[in-house]
Image: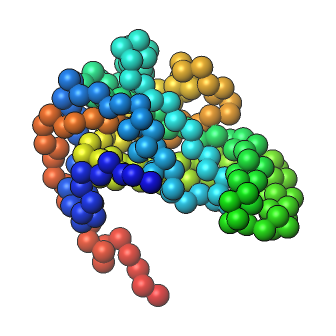
Amino acid sequence: MTHNFVNNDFYNILDGRRSIRVYDETVKIPKEEMSAMIKEAAKAPSSVNMQPWRMVVVESDEAKATLKPLIRFNTRQNDTSSAMILIFGDLECYKYGEMIYDQAVSEGLMPKEVRDQQLETIVPLYESLPTNAMNDLVKVDSSLLAMQLMLVARAYGYDTNPIGGFEADQLAEAFDLDPKRYVPVTILSIGKAKESGYESVRLAPEVITEWK
């Protein structure tokens, strides 16, 4: 697979990431390149490989106008970015279980008997989980995807900003998704940075970690 990486220095990708709020409005990311970044980001791990993340790429003027009143104080990102990526968790992700595991079998990554055993266990379990448990599960998994997408974007020469300030109760329905099935997780703005983001400090390992 060909990668359009302009930066393959992992430390630079990691240490140089900033939350960018103003982008070069003249830069639009081609659909093929956005799809390639999403494909790379979707290599993130998920519980029993159910991949519960679902995305809406908001890039047209019309779609951005729909989003704008729902993102509170984050309108600069919406106005200037190449796109706003809405990331949802799918509470019914198990419906894709057969597709995922059948592909694993067809590519020689999993024996058919393992596929059968896994699906016989996983699907009923997921179907039986209470909504709050599924909500937590898909949010954790989809957050892994979001973080990976931010790092992949930097490898491709773009910057991002994770956004948590939005009207979560209205987001899915505004973009024609079933709000009972799709749980908003975060929104990522993406594009070419027009201004530098702020550097920030992090708590030391001894503050956030205990060894037993």
Q: Is residue 177 above or below residue 117?
A: above
- Residue 50 pos. (x, y %): 66, 52
Q: Is residue 35 above or below residue 103?
A: above
Occupied quadrant, residue 47: bottom right
- Residue 1 pos. (x, y %): 44, 54
> For this view, does 122 lie left or right of residue 32?
right
* Residue 147 visible to an observer of this rendering: no
Q: Is residue 61 above or below residue 3?
A: above
Residue reaching furthest left? 195
- Residue 46 pos. (x, y %): 59, 57
Depth check: give the residue in front, 76 or 160.
160
Residue at position x 47%, y 26% in the image: 167
- Residue 112 pos. (x, y %): 82, 64
Q: How is the image coloured?
A: rainbow
Residue at position x 73%, y 57% in the image: 106
Residue reaching furthest bottom? 212
- Number of on-image labels: 0
Residue at position x 41%, y 12% in the image: 62
> For this view, does 183 lie left or right of residue 130?
left
Residue at position x 27%, y 60% in the image: 8
Q: Is residue 185 above or below residue 82?
A: below
* Residue 64 visible to an observer of this rendering: yes
